[in-house]
């Protein structure tokens, strides 16, 4: 039997607890050490998950541990230094999204890991949600023919600021925090992007950044999609954190609707199915959709390390998603379409 992969977690904040639970559920890997500059968070996570080896400094962690991978769950400004540190120690790295504060930083991180010959994956988990995977499976089946239109929609009035108060203070909000997921789903389902046109608004007067964004996307294969995000939309039934999907194809349609209802209409008729994510033993509603996807993406990472394959959300792949975020902000400011190829050169 193959030896268990030894991993370390850097960053013990809000979301990292989900990652720690997920590591417990995955065979073939274990977190053996944790690191955080905040001694209280280090103690809370260490005690909760029984991790005795604790570090306040990442350099000390790499010096003191023999690791097969590191899971970086800190905020974006620290990502480049930590990924480059992992590369210098020849340690494969998972990096939380957003991948980096700038596209230049992200490109440098990808180059560092490529030059070191170590895998790099971005923890872009929304495409791993089972309802989104179900939509991808229908597309792959060919039942609706060639897609020509799509809509990826996340509209909610959920109070995300109570658990993550820093979200209210940044100049950038919904595109960088949530829209990045929706844009990645659009790429995952409908293909890479040639151009994007963006409009944003700030409805909540108590925050600094935008809380509404609408993006019109030209995909390289000719498909057109709309990606729309809102944290200012009050609905009769709160859909958080569901992503809703509409795709029209030459032979039919796909509708992923509120309540995880998937309706597929094709030449053979209409079928309706329930694609609700499982409620894991440690998960809680309504977060269970995202929590389940954390297990899926981390299991994918372990499989890639074991088999020597490139992760679906590798650093190189995520450059295309991060470029979309940068292009969206640029286009919102200029109110002009932005071409993607120039950003990725």
Image: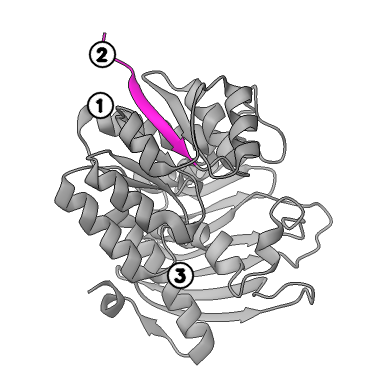
Would residue 208 be seen by someone viewing this image from the given angle? yes
Comparing labels 2 and 3, the label whose residue is closer to the camera: 2
Q: Is residue 171 left or right of residue 25?
A: right
Disc 2 to disc 1: CB gap under 8 Å: yes
Name which residue lies at 21% across and 42% down.
118
Counting residues from the start of the chain, the first of labels 2 and 3 encountered is 2
Observer-nearest of 51 and 69: 51
Alpha carbon separation for disc pair 1 and 3: 32 Å
Question: Disc 3 designates what residue?
Answer: 325
Question: Disc 2 designates what residue?
Answer: 2
- The quarter of the picture where residue 308 lies is top left
Observer-nearest of 222 and 99: 99
Q: Which residues are magenta?
A: 1-10
SS state under label 1: helix
Question: Disc 1 designates what residue?
Answer: 306
Name which residue lies at 21% across and 58% down.
111
């Amino acid at each position: 039997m193959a030896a268990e992969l030894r991993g370390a977690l850097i960053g013990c904040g809000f979301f990292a607890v989900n990652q720690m639970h997920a590591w417990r559920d995955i065979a073939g890997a274990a977190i053996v050490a944790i690191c955080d500059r905040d001694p209280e968070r280090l103690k809370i996570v260490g005690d909760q998950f029984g991790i005795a080896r604790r570090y306040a400094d990442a350099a000390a962690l790499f010096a003191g541990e023999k690791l097969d991978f590191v899971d970086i769950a800190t905020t974006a400004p620290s990502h480049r230094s930590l990924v480059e540190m992992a590369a210098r120690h020849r340690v494969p790295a998972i990096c939380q999204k957003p991948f980096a504060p700038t596209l230049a930083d992200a490109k440098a991180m990808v180059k560092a890991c490529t030059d070191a010959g170590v895998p790099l994956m971005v923890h872009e988990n929304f495409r791993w949600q089972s309802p989104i995977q179900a939509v991808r499976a229908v597309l792959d089946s060919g039942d609706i023919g060639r897609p020509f239109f799509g809509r990826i929609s996340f509209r909610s009035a959920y109070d995300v600021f109570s658990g993550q108060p820093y979200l209210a203070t940044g100049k950038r909000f919904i595109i960088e925090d949530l829209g990045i997921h929706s844009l990645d789903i659009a790429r995952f389902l409908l293909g890479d992007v040639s151009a994007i046109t963006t409009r944003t608004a700030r409805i909540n007067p108590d925050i600094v950044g935008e809380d509404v964004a609408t993006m019109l996307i030209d995909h390289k294969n000719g498909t057109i999609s709309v990606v729309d995000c809102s944290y200012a939309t009050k609905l009769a039934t709160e859909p958080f954190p569901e992503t809703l999907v509409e795709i029209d194809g030459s032979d039919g349609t796909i509708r992923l609707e509120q309540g995880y209802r998937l309706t597929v209409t094709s030449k053979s008729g209409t079928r309706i199915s329930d694609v609700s994510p499982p409620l894991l033993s440690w998960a809680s509603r309504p977060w269970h959709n995202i929590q389940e996807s954390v297990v899926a993406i981390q299991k994918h990472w372990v499989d890639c390390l074991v088999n020597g394959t490139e992760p679906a959300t590798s650093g190189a792949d995520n450059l295309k998603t991060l470029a979309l975020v940068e292009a969206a902000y640029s286009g919102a400011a200029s109110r002009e379409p932005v071409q993607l190829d120039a950003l990725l050169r």
